Image (cartoon, grey):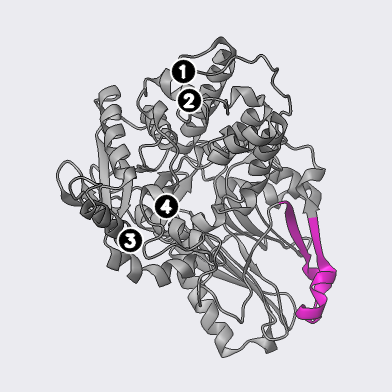
């Protein structure tokens, strides 16, 4: 994970408040890349100034790297990972360095757009070409890395790009940069013109969809409607119709995990885990953890991060039920649903992979601690600012911080892992939400297929940028094996009846392909886990009352 902060301003427009903002933005974006940081400044004219700030979290290659990358007047800020595509990156090489070398050899914006369409991985970037005096910036097609933009206004006539903001500030209108285009500014033509009124005239967008490159946009899904006599999926013993798709799916998912787990640099601390998994004990995270085991040396641990919140509202309701004679004994405050399933799946992993040291990290968050952190979390997740955003960000914040106790020893533990795996994406790709079954029951297969397409189309605009901002402040990087564009494309091409069976039971029909995969791997218990949203499984949601998830936060 790396941090990007870039500004264009005119010399006479700088104010003390703007300089204070820049210092704050350098600080929060510097936290994303604790290994190296620096600033580069270019004066394009007597008045027009470009400032580039980059921070580096070194996870690729064996030599030190400092950002921004700079050569022959070209400057490149890179926050990403190249896992697949046309770049030939050796095990000991840094992907940002290799990509910068390739960018510097290009002559046009179309060539640049084609290059990014031929690499797969999460990214955001800012690139200045000295030869053409053009500035390019963008995000990957699924929006897996954050890049925020503030366009010049009369009150604050600056163009700002940043991985992370400092929170809500009415003077600066930071928004998520859209993913469907790569943006270009003709700085050579802009000259000394007023930024507020002149910027749009020299702003070009390159539509990713206009190229035939393989990694340009979320795919269209197969629209084949199953026949009326399709047999009902009644168990997780693999029906013949799933066999070929199941094996191919396992191969593609295994490759995705391998690309995200191999060659993570070792940590200086002896015996420290270099990989962690956000682990609820659900089928998504358990399959990811199981597959990752193949690619980490057997003498190293893997951290399983399991977060639980003290939720006063839930505790109060449980007490009322016990007073009415409904509930049993008072449960421990942190024995939330995700803790229960996490402990159960820990045992299944230990049984199947007994030689691995699985560090089950119990991250217990007292109510007062979660409230005390709310202001910081709201700032880092901005411009996301709904009640649901906060409950999800809260869980990710404390999980990625990695501070807890080892369940077996009840001793304090701090996860040092800089790479975190997340099972996000399986529900969208494979029909894991309850609404998928509801839509089928009311409107049938065609409507279900349309809903699955909407789920894929919405991935870039939902929450990946928010999650990136929340996690990266700890100098860590989230990787999503289910959101490899190669895997997304493979699943999209499968007919719907090979992904799910909305007519079956919740532990069989939804995400049927993934459940069958878990069963094939020997994860019998995991294959039967019901879907549970992170904010409810960890009880980070509805701590004080019933507020609708779409409600905007106050302030």
For residue 235, the mark is 1
| Residue located farthest toward the top when viewing the structure as drawn | 240
Which residue is under mark 2? Answer: 508
Q: Is mark 3 on a helix, strand or loop?
A: helix
Which residue is under mark 4? Answer: 535
Residue 173's x, y, as percent?
A: 64, 74
Q: Crowding near pointer 4: few (<14 within 10 Å), some, many (20+)?
A: many
Is there any visible trace of residue 302 in the rendered image?
no
Q: Where does the magenta region start and end?
A: 180-205
Q: Which of marks 3 and 2 is nearer the N terminus?
A: 3
- In the image, which is nearer the foreground, mark 4 or mark 3? 3
Residue 461's x, y, as percent?
A: 63, 53
Is residue 497 toward the left or the right of residue 134 in the image?
left
For residue 313, the mark is 3
Q: Which of marks 4 and 1 is nearer the N terminus?
A: 1
Which of the two residues, 536 or 178, is positioned nearer the viewer here?
536
What separation in Å lies between label 2 and label 1 (alpha carbons)?
6 Å
- In the image, which is nearer the foreground, mark 4 or mark 1? 1
């Amino acid at each position: 994970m790396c941090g990007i902060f870039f500004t264009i301003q005119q010399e006479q427009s700088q104010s003390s408040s703007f300089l204070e903002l820049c210092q704050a933005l350098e600080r929060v974006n510097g936290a994303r890349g604790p290994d190296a940081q620096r600033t580069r400044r270019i004066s394009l004219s007597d008045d027009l100034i470009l400032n580039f700030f980059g921070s580096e979290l070194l996870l690729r290659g064996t030599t030190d790297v400092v950002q921004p990358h700079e050569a022959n007047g070209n400057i490149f800020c890179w926050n990403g990972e190249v896992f697949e595509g046309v770049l030939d990156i050796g095990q000991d090489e840094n992907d940002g360095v290799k990509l910068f070398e390739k960018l510097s050899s290009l002559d046009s914006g179309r060539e640049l757009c084609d290059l990014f369409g031929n690499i797969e991985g999460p990214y955001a970037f800012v690139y200045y070409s000295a030869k053409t005096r053009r500035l390019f910036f963008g995000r990957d097609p699924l929006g897996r890395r954050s890049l925020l933009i503030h366009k010049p206004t009369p009150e604050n006539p600056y163009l700002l790009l940043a991985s992370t903001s400092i929170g809500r500030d009415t003077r600066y209108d930071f928004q998520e940069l859209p993913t469907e285009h790569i943006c270009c500014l003709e700085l050579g033509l802009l000259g000394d013109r007023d930024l507020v009124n002149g910027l749009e005239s020299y702003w070009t967008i390159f539509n990713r969809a206009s190229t035939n490159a393989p990694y340009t946009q979320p795919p269209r899904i197969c629209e084949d409607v199953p026949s009326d006599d399709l047999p009902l999926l009644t168990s997780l013993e693999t029906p013949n119709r799933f066999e070929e798709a199941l094996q191919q799916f396992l191969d593609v998912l295994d490759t995705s995990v391998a690309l995200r787990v191999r060659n993570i640099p070792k940590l200086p601390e002896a015996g420290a885990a270099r990989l962690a998994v956000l682990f609820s004990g659900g089928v998504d995270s358990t399959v990811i953890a199981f597959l990752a085991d193949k690619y980490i040396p057997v003498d190293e641990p893997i951290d399983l991060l399991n977060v639980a919140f003290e939720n006063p509202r839930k505790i109060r309701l449980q007490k009322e039920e016990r007073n009415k004679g409904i509930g049993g004994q008072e449960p421990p405050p942190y024995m939330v649903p995700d803790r229960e399933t996490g402990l159960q799946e820990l045992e299944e992993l230990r049984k199947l992979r007994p030689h691995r040291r699985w560090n089950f990290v119990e991250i217990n968050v007292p109510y007062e601690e979660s409230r005390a952190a709310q202001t910081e979390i709201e700032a880092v997740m901005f411009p996301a600012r709904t009640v649901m955003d906060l409950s999800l960000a809260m869980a990710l914040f404390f999980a990625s911080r990695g501070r807890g106790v080892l369940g077996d020893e009840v001793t304090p533990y701090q996860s040092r892992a800089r790479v975190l795996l997340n099972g996000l994406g399986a529900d969208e790709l494979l029909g894991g939400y309850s609404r998928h079954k509801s839509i089928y029951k009311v409107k049938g297969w065609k409507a279900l297929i349309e809903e699955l397409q909407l789920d894929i189309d919405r991935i870039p605009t939902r929450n990946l940028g928010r999650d990136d901002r929340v996690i990266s402040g700890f100098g860590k990087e989230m990787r999503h094996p289910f959101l490899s564009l190669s895997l997304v494309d493979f699943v999209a091409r499968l007919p719907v009846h090979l992904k799910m069976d909305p007519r079956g039971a919740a532990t069989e029909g939804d995400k049927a392909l993934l459940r069958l995969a878990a069963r094939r791997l020997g994860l019998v218990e995991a294959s039967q886990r019901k879907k549970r949203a992170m904010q409810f499984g960890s009880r980070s949601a509805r701590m004080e009352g019933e507020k609708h998830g779409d409600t905007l936060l106050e302030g």
